Image: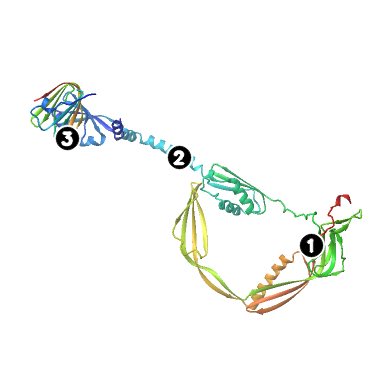
């Protein structure tokens, strides 16, 4: 059973050998390794077949014994392929393309982030990558809910995250928070308001609780400003969560310094370049980054395309740089300018809720640093919450007043 | 199928340089150096050195032929040695 199958794959040639000495020709060929299969006597010769590769070998002995060889039929897989190679090539190409398309559809080729305005797309994609979702990975291999939760947690300002993986495309749908959630004080907790620092009360806006001081009063740090103990309209004592803006005139202080000598480590010439090929989620490193770990580097990633179609292959180039130390010396004038620039930034951040009434600055140059100390007279809210412990039964009678 | 071994001495009492085995009168395996003198469906003549073997029958065909021997299939009616 196997021999005919084997002969079919190798291919056989049917022929007719005609001549007076056909038997000697047959004997010679058979004894010299040229197999002649099933010879059938016919007239002055015989019909037989031989393997396709052996047919050419018959020519020399045929000439020797005066035999005329006539090829009758070629059959076998090798002849089938040769005669139909274009069709076979087409079928094979079609099957391969189909299999390739089906197979590639199982991998994530594209990740889209939709709906974000304030949160940068790179941040979302970076969070997704940290959870294993990036181009080239197997699309069925992701725990979508875990990735959604991770992106939500790592990117404040998001209201919801939804990931849809369809075929080779992963869409990350983002809903951002419209406004910041306002923290509403818990009215169930009794709170006093005390002075966070000393000052003279300029203005009071009391929303809840009983004011203990009035505008014009001088208070020290820790003095009670608004009490949680409150007598309601039923003359019943109740505890409140006191809330008020107590604006007082007080002082404020900021100190800044700027070094007049700085040693800056700068990038110098290129030390080394390494490349990584990312294919279907796997990284293949070309080059060695040994001894470069402590040096600054730049990474650039390039996605490959085939006639506009994005491929799941990207090349990541990492360039490592040597470093050089550079000492910069600033003049006093430059140091002063820089120090005042730092002071200005601090005023904008720390004092944004305050009204500056006056400022006095003192400048000192000491230990190669330009230092500025700024003293302010400001109007600021000095109310500070202080929880109270009380044995008075707590009952919020707001709705009854 | 019962194997029927005919010793060379029975068929060819003078031959000493080849060996023949016959199976159910349908297959003959000859070990030795043979030449094919005549091919045919009813008569097959083989030569070994100076001796000749003639197979007579129906549908005779050589199914395998190498320098070590020869295998013949068919319905044997007679095997002659001369």
Give how far apart the Cα atoms at labels 2 and 1 are. 73 Å
Q: What x and y, as percent, mark residue A43? A: 17, 23
Report which residue position mark 1 lands on.
Answer: A386
Q: Could you say whether the residue bearing mark 3 is in a helix, strand or loop?
A: loop
Q: What is the crowding at mark 2: few (fewer than 14 residues within 10 Å), some, or many (at least 20)?
A: few
Q: Nearer the viewer, mark 1 or mark 3?
A: 1
Is the C-beta separation of discs 1 and 3 under 8 Å?
A: no
**Residue found at x 60% / y 54%:** A123
Distance, label 1 to label 3, CA atoms, is 114 Å
Tag 2 secondary structure: helix
Circle 2 sits on which residue? A97
> Measured along the vertical axis of the image, is residue A116 above or below residue A295?
above
Q: Which residue is mark 3?
A: B68
Badge 3, how many Cα within 10 Å: few under 14, some, many 20+? few
Q: Nearer the viewer, residue A246 or A237?
A: A237
Q: Nearer the viewer, residue A88 or A247?
A: A247
Chain designation of label 2 = A
Q: Is residue A314 visible?
A: yes
């Amino acid at each position: 059973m196997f021999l005919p199958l084997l002969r079919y794959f190798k291919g056989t040639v049917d022929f007719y050998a005609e001549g007076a000495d056909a038997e000697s020709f047959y004997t010679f060929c058979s004894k010299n390794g040229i197999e002649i299969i099933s010879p059938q006597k016919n007239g002055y010769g015989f019909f037989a077949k031989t393997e396709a590769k052996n047919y050419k070998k018959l020519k020399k002995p045929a000439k020797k014994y005066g035999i005329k060889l006539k090829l009758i039929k070629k059959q076998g897989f090798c002849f089938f392929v040769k005669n139909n190679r274009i069709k076979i090539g087409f079928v094979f190409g079609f099957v391969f393309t189909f299999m390739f398309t089906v197979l590639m559809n199982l991998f994530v080729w594209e990740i889209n982030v939709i709906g974000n305005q304030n949160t940068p797309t790179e941040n979302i994609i970076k969070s997704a990558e940290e959870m294993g979702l990036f181009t080239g990975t197997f699309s069925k291999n992701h725990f979508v809910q875990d990735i959604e939760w991770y992106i939500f947690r790592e990117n404040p300002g998001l209201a919801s995250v939804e990931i849809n993986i369809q075929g080779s495309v992963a869409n990350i749908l983002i809903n951002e928070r419209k406004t910041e959630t306002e923290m509403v004080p818990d009215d169930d907790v009794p709170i006093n308001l005390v002075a966070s620092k000393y000052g003279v009360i300029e203005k009071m806006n009391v929303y809840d609780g009983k004011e203990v001081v009035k505008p014009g009063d001088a208070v020290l740090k820790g003095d009670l400003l608004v009490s949680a103990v409150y007598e309601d309209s039923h003359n019943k004592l109740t505890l409140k969560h006191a809330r008020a803006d107590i604006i007082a005139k007080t002082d404020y202080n900021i100190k800044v310094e700027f070094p007049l000598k700085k040693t800056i480590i700068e990038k110098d010439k290129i030390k080394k370049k390494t490349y990584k090929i990312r294919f279907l989620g796997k990284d293949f490193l070309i080059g060695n980054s040994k001894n470069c770990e402590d040096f600054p580097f730049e990474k650039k990633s390039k996605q490959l395309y085939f006639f506009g179609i994005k491929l799941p292959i990207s090349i990541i180039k990492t360039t490592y740089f040597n470093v050089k130390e550079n000492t910069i010396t600033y003049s006093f004038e430059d140091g002063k300018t820089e120090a005042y620039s730092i002071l200005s930034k601090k005023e904008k951040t720390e004092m944004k809720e305050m009204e500056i009434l006056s400022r006095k600055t003192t400048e000192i140059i000491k230990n190669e640093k330009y230092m500025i100390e700024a003293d302010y007279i400001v109007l600021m809210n000095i109310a500070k919450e202080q929880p109270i412990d009380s044995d008075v039964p707590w009952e919020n009678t707001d709705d009854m007043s | 199928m019962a194997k029927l071994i005919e010793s060379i001495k029975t068929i060819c009492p003078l031959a000493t340089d080849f060996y023949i085995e016959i199976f159910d009168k349908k297959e003959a395996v000859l070990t030795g150096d043979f030449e094919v003198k005549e091919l045919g469906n009813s008569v097959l003549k083989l030569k070994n050195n100076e001796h000749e073997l003639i197979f007579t029958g129906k549908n005779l065909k050589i199914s395998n032929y190498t320098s070590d021997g020869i295998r013949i299939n068919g319905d044997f009616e007679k095997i002659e040695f001369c």
